């Protein structure tokens, strides 16, 4: 676990719960400015085609939203900054509205086939389309499938790699098609031989 993630996540109530359940608690982290994304995190983020983002309303209720796009739609802008083009969805704007009251976000990104999970904590800001043309260009907003309504920029404060326990392996249709394509070709070849 990264230093800053420990400091943020291991609150007194979490430490008390650990002591109650296990008779001991993990040592809290030493406060730091932020955890910087390294090569492993950057590569992992570049391959994701979806993630889950949690925000908190001004009434204190959490809200979790799925975000998806082509692999790499979540861009790493720097070692402590990520962003994505936000496409039109159900037009409820819960995440966007929540960010105006509380900019804290938590992201969970999962690689199901490899059973890997990255958690990110940060501060997010939404930019309307046209407010930052340079950011739009970096995010490929003009090439994104669907209607881009805004850009979301996240200042990464902390991250943590989760253990693979209880992650059920799953594959996308594209991943399965790539594996099955040679089998289909061989079946077609054999069917052709049988007909002759």
Image (cartoon, grey):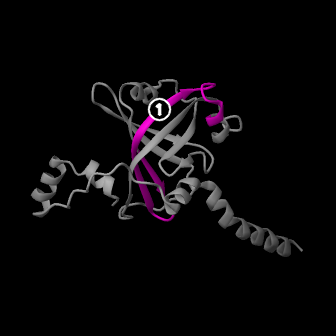
Give the camera-side residue of 68 and 179.
Answer: 68
Q: Height in image: 49 above or below 94?
A: below
Taking the spot 52% from the left edge, 35% from the top edge, the residue there is 152
State the predominant SS element of the stretch in magenta: strand
| 120 sits left or right of 59 in the view | right
User: In which image quadrant can residue 182 be found?
Assistant: bottom right
Taking the spot 25% from the left edge, 57% from the top edge, the residue there is 29
| 169 sits left or right of 139 in the view | left
Residue 192: within the magenta?
no
Taking the spot 41% from the left edge, 29% from the top edge, the residue there is 99
- Total numbered badges shown on the rendered structure: 1
- Locate residue 103, reporting x and y percent: 39, 32
Q: Height in image: 175 above or below 137?
A: below
User: In which image quadrant can residue 180 be found?
Assistant: bottom right
Residue 125 seen in the current view: yes
Taking the spot 15% from the left edge, 48% from the top edge, the residue there is 12
Residue 112 seen in the current view: no
Give the camera-side residue of 66 and 103.
Answer: 103
Q: Residues within 10 Å of mark 1 (few under 14, many from 20)?
A: some
- Locate residue 63, reporting x and y percent: 37, 34
- Locate residue 150, reporting x and y percent: 57, 29
> Where the C terminus falls, by quadrant?
bottom right
Q: Among all residues in the image, which is located at the extreme right?
A: 196
The residue that label 1 is drawn on is 125
> Where the N terminus falls, by quadrant?
bottom left
Please provide the residue range marked out in magenta: 107-135
User: In which image quadrant can residue 183 be found?
Assistant: bottom right
Give the camera-side residue of 39 and 24.
Answer: 39
Secondary structure of the residue carrying numbered label 1 = strand
- Locate residue 25, reporting x and y percent: 16, 60
């Amino acid at each position: 676990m990264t230093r800053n993630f420990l400091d943020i996540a291991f609150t007194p109530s979490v430490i008390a719960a650990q002591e109650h359940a296990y008779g001991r608690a993990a040592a809290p982290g030493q406060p730091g400015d932020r955890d910087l994304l390294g090569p492993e995190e950057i590569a992992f983020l570049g391959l994701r085609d979806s993630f889950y983002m949690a925000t908190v309303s001004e009434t204190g209720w959490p809200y979790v939203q799925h975000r998806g796009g082509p692999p790499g739609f979540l861009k790493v802008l720097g070692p402590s900054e990520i962003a994505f083009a936000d496409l039109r969805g159900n037009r409820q704007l819960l995440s966007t509205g929540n960010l105006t009251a509380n900019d804290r976000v938590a992201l969970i990104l999962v690689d199901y086939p490899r059973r890997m999970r990255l958690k990110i904590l940060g501060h997010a800001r939404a930019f309307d389309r046209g407010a930052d043309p340079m950011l739009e260009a970096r995010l490929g907003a003009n090439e994104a499938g669907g209607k881009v309504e805004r850009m979301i920029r996240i200042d990464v404060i902390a991250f943590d790699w989760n253990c693979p326990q209880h992650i059920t392996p799953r594959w996308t249709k594209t991943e399965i098609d790539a594996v099955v394509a040679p089998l289909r070709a061989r079946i077609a070849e054999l069917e052709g031989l049988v007909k002759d």
